[in-house]
């Protein structure tokens, strides 16, 4: 992101804080962003798509996290009541998608807890919504395809799913900016999902991985459904915790970072 955009984002965050702490409006700083919220909103999306082309993964995640926080202010903050013209539901879905891409999947889910999956949403937005909430219902063609590959995102069905989304990106680029935004973020979310999915990582790092052997674990509906790994869990698999070597491993991970579920995978 360029410095001008970062400055505007900083102004927006300061304005949001002033509104949050009930500082009288006449005492607010005379930030230019207060009269240019539309400009900042459009610029934020431009920066999102610029960041998606970033080759440095850490830079991508840092920018997407900052931009996600910016979108969030437009619909879920004390300053939001002073901003007009932004539809809360799709905007929060886009913000959640940006958080997911920046490695904050739990934040993405929490943001959408109060959002309704309404008929006014595009199919791509509906799928983003149910995907980020981990609540796939097969209510449209995207969800039907995804439900068949959610545990192991590979093969012809996965290729069909991502191919359909790429078609929507191309169509949106020609005819509908909103379709383009939703489809582009959806594809990036699915690419990240594929990278962190339990099935993908088991197939890459579990000794002599056999889908039929792991099927009871991947498709067990009687316990908490594990779709994907946290980054710390993936690091453990990458470092050989599921290899066939006779080694002892020591895990040092923060609370709620996935030690228990990782041990369940090792035991299985």
Image (cartoon, grey):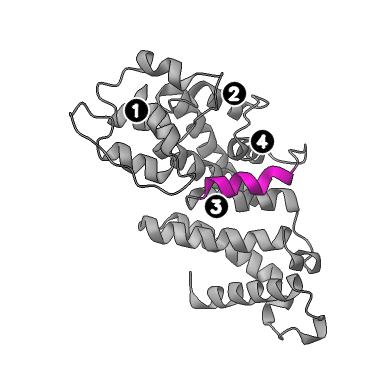
User: From the viewer's perspective, is 150 left or right of 136?
Assistant: left
Principal secondary structure, stretch drawn in magenta? helix
**Which residue lies under the disc numbered 3?**
99
**Where does label 4 land, which residue?**
123
Indicate the secondary structure of the residue bearing disc 3.
Answer: helix
Looking at the image, is mark 3 or mark 4 nearer the viewer? 3
Q: Position of residue 11 (x, y in %)?
A: 63, 77
Q: Is residue 50 above or below residue 30?
A: above
Lower sequence index among marks 3 and 4? 3
Query: Which badge, 4 or 2, is on the more N-terminal residue?
Result: 4
Question: Could you classify mark 3 by the number of other residues whose Cα lies within 10 Å: few (under 14), some (14-19), or many (20 or more)?
Answer: many
Which residue is located at x 48 percent, y 53 percent? 102
In the depicted structure, whether residue 118 falls above or below residue 72: above
Q: Quick one: 109 or 116, which is closer to the camera?
A: 109
Would you say the residues marked 4 and 2 are in contact, meaning their CB atoms lie under 8 Å apart? Answer: no
The percent coordinates of residue 26 (x first, y second) are 81, 85
Label 1 sits on residue: 266
Q: Residue at x 34, y 28 (%)?
A: 266
Left or right of 148? Residue 119 is right
Give the x, y percent position of residue 29. 71, 85
3 and 1 marks in contact (CB < 8 Å): no
Alpha carbon distance from label 1 to label 2: 31 Å
């Amino acid at each position: 992101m360029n410095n001008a955009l970062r400055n505007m984002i900083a102004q927006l965050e300061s304005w949001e804080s002033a509104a949050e702490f009930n500082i009288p409006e006449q005492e607010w700083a005379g930030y230019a962003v207060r009269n240019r919220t539309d400009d900042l909103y459009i610029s934020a999306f431009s920066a999102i798509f610029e960041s998606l082309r970033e080759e440095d993964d850490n830079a991508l995640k840092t920018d997407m996290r900052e931009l996600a926080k910016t979108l969030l202010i437009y619909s879920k903050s004390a300053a939001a009541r002073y901003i007009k013209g932004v539809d809360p539901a799709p905007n929060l879905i886009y913000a959640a998608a940006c958080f997911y891409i920046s490695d904050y999947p739990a934040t993405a889910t929490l943001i959408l807890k109060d959002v309704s999956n309404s008929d006014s949403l595009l199919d791509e937005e509906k799928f983003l919504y149910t995907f980020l909430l981990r609540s796939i219902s097969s209510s449209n063609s995207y969800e039907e395809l995804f439900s068949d590959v959610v545990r192991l995102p590979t093969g012809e069905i996965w290729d069909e799913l991502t191919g359909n989304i790429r078609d929507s990106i191309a169509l949106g680029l020609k005819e509908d900016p909103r379709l383009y935004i939703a489809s582009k973020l959806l594809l990036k979310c699915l690419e990240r999902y594929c990278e962190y999915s339990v099935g993908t990582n088991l197939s890459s790092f579990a000794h002599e991985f056999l889908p039929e052997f792991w099927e009871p674990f991947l498709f067990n509906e009687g316990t908490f459904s594990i779709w994907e790994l946290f980054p710390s869990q993936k690091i453990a698999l990458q470092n050989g915790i599921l290899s066939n070597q006779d080694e002892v491993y020591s895990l040092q991970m923060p609370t709620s970072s996935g030690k228990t579920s990782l041990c369940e995978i090792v035991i299985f």
